Every structure is written in structure tokens, then in C-alpha cells.
Image (spheres, rainbow, N blue to C red):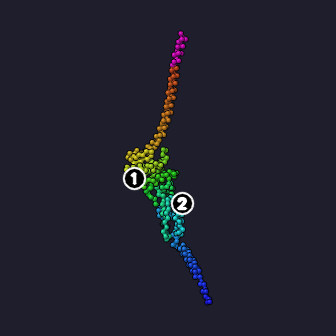
């Protein structure tokens, strides 16, 4: 019998392949980590430019400081929702914020503000903007004013009524709002929330803040179709051209408002006067009655004396 030689077992090439594959994956992972580190340390991962669009009432510096979005900050570390929340929490007049990222390194942020509906000049000479949501903010001298908005005068101490007026002006058509040049606080005893408005087209309008939203249609119709004059929009609406107005219209208005008080006082006077006349009549009647009794008693005394002489 011949003996067969058993060939030696070959080395394990599969194991070498596994070791080589692990080394390859490890090297690839290290390469990726190195690239990521280099990327985040390079200027490509930084914000190069920030574009603020739509802001008028706040400066770029204030927006950058409150939002944290500045050139040089991490591009991928900027969250759109967090940026919007920071800006709206800092500035109450910001209505909405939209963030648009453009790689590499450019971020555009669109700011929508509540629109100003009027401006007010305060006693210290500063200018305040009354916004459509009722908020009031102070403006800097460098900010440009839109002259197509009314100016509020004599509104000191009327913050609540001024906020209500701002919301009413926000619902006013843009063309009519641009025509209003001044709104003056014009209270009376009957209407403590009365206002007077002057238009650039030459009209003088008297109404109240609560009635203004309901009277806009009537006001627009008169301004567009009639010649300049005085428009009154209170319980009843009226229009009088300037040629038909009396000389002292404010005195006439005061007289009308005092008519009710005067009528009541006259009625009281008439009542007291009638009581006095009644008392006088009663007194005269009593005096007449007493005189009549004296007239009757005198002849009786005369008759007694005649009897005695007889």
C-alpha cells in the first residue's frame, strides 16, 4: 500500500481580506472625520453675508444682535425657527420672520413689520409711530418718515383710545388714509371720545373713534363726490360745504350740546316760578278775605253806637 501525503492546509486568505477591509473602512472614516474638521474650520462653513429685507423700524445692528446671525458665525448652526423666535420676542412690532439659506455662506432674512398708520410728535420733540396692531414705538431721527400718514395732535394721556384709533385706521382704505393729514383729539361733554380729522383734499371731519370704522363708507363717498366742507359723523351723518357754514361753528356746536342742560334748567325755573306765583295768589286771596271781614264788621259797630245814642 502506498501512503498518500496529505497536503498542508492553506493559510486563511479570507481573514486577511477581512483585516484589509476593516483597515480600509477605518482609513475612510478617519478621512471623513478629517474632512469634516477641515470643513468646519474653514471659511466655507461660516456665514459670509446676511441680507436683511423688509425692516424699516429697526436697524440691521439691532436685528443681528438679537438674532445672533452675523458674518463669521457657523452657517449650519443657525436654526430658522430659533432666529424667528428671538426676533419676534425682542421686537413686538415684527409680524413675521422668514429665513432663507443659500449655500455657501449667504443667509437672507425677510422681516414683515406691522405697518404704521399714523405718527405723533411728542412734547420733547421725538416722533412716535402708531402701528396697525395698536403698538406705539419711538423713531430715531435717521429714520425716514412716510408723509402719506396722518399726524396725531393733542393725544397726551389717551393711550387706550389711541390704540383703538390705530386699529380703526388700519382698516381704512389706503387712498383715504393717505388723504388724512391730521387727527386731533376733540372731546366734548356728550362725546368724550370725539376726534376731528383734516384731509389734504380740504375736508374737516368730526366723528368718534368707535364710530369711525362704520362711517368709512360714508366718508369715502362724500370726499370723492362733494366739494370741500365739514362732515359730521355722529349719531346722524351730515355734510355742509364751507360756504354754508356759520362763522363760529364751534360755538354753535357747544350751544347745541348745552341745549339739553339749558332746557332742564329752564323747566326747573318755570316750576319754581309757578310755585312762587301760586303762593303770591294765595296770599293776596287771604288778604282780600281779611279785608272783606273788616268791611263787614265795621257797619256792625256803627249800628251799635246808633243804638246807644238812641
- Residue for point 48% across, 44% down: 190
Crowd class of label 2 (few under 14; some 14 to 19; many from 20; radius 10 Å)? few
Residue 279 lies, in percent from the top left, at 51, 29
How far apart are the alpha carbons under marks 2 and 1?
41 Å
Which residue in the rendered view is the most extreme toward the front? 1
Q: The residue tagged with tag 1: helix, strand or loop?
A: loop
Q: Residue at x 58, y 82 (%)?
A: 13
Q: Nearer the viewer, residue 277 or 294?
A: 277
Question: Residue 78, how many percent across, how many down?
Answer: 53, 67
Extreme-top residue of the structure: 310
Dot 2 corresponds to which residue? 89
Magenta region: 294-310
Eye-nearest disc, 2 or 1: 2
Q: Quadrant of the N terminus?
A: bottom right
Percent of width and height locating residue 179: 41, 54
Considering depth in this image, is 116 or 264 the residue closer to the camera?
116
2 or 1: tag closer to the N-terminus: 2
Q: Residue at x 48, y 55 (%)?
A: 132
Q: Is residue 206 above or below residue 147?
A: above
> From this viewpoint, which residue is outermost toward the bottom?
2
Question: Residue at position x 51%, y 51% from top?
Answer: 160
Give the crowd class for mark 1: few <14, some 14-19, many >=20 residues within 10 Å: some
- Helix, strand or loop at mark 2: helix
Q: Dot 1 corresponds to which residue?
A: 201
Amino acid at each position: 500500500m502506498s501512503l498518500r501525503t496529505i497536503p498542508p492546509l492553506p493559510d486563511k486568505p479570507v481573514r486577511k481580506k477581512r483585516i484589509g477591509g476593516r483597515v480600509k473602512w477605518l482609513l475612510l472614516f478617519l478621512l471623513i472625520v478629517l474632512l469634516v474638521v477641515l470643513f468646519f474650520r474653514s471659511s466655507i462653513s461660516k456665514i459670509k453675508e446676511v441680507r436683511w429685507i423688509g425692516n424699516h423700524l429697526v436697524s440691521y445692528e439691532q436685528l443681528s444682535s438679537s438674532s445672533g446671525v452675523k458674518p463669521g458665525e457657523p452657517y449650519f448652526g443657525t436654526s430658522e425657527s430659533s432666529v424667528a423666535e428671538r426676533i419676534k420676542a425682542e421686537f413686538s412690532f415684527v409680524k413675521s420672520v422668514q429665513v432663507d439659506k443659500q449655500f455657501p455662506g449667504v443667509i437672507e432674512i425677510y422681516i414683515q413689520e406691522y405697518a404704521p398708520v399714523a405718527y405723533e410728535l411728542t412734547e420733547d420733540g421725538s416722533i412716535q409711530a402708531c402701528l396697525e396692531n395698536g403698538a406705539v414705538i419711538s423713531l430715531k431721527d435717521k429714520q425716514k418718515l412716510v408723509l402719506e400718514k396722518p399726524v396725531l395732535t393733542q393725544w397726551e394721556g389717551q393711550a387706550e383710545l389711541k390704540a383703538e384709533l390705530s386699529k380703526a385706521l388700519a382698516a381704512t382704505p389706503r387712498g383715504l388714509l393717505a388723504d388724512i393729514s391730521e387727527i386731533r383729539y376733540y372731546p366734548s361733554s356728550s362725546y368724550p371720545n370725539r376726534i376731528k380729522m383734516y384731509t389734504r383734499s380740504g375736508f374737516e371731519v368730526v366723528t368718534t373713534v368707535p364710530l369711525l370704522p362704520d362711517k368709512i363708507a360714508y366718508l369715502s363717498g362724500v370726499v370723492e363726490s362733494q366739494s370741500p366742507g365739514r362732515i359730521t359723523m355722529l349719531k346722524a351723518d351730515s355734510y355742509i360745504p364751507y360756504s354754508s357754514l356759520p362763522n363760529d361753528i364751534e360755538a354753535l356746536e357747544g350751544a347745541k350740546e348745552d341745549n339739553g342742560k339749558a332746557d332742564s334748567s329752564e323747566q326747573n325755573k318755570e316750576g319754581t316760578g309757578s310755585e312762587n306765583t301760586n303762593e303770591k295768589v294765595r296770599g293776596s286771596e287771604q288778604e282780600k278775605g281779611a279785608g272783606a271781614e273788616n268791611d263787614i264788621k265795621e257797619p256792625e259797630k256803627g249800628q251799635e253806637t246808633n243804638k246807644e245814642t238812641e
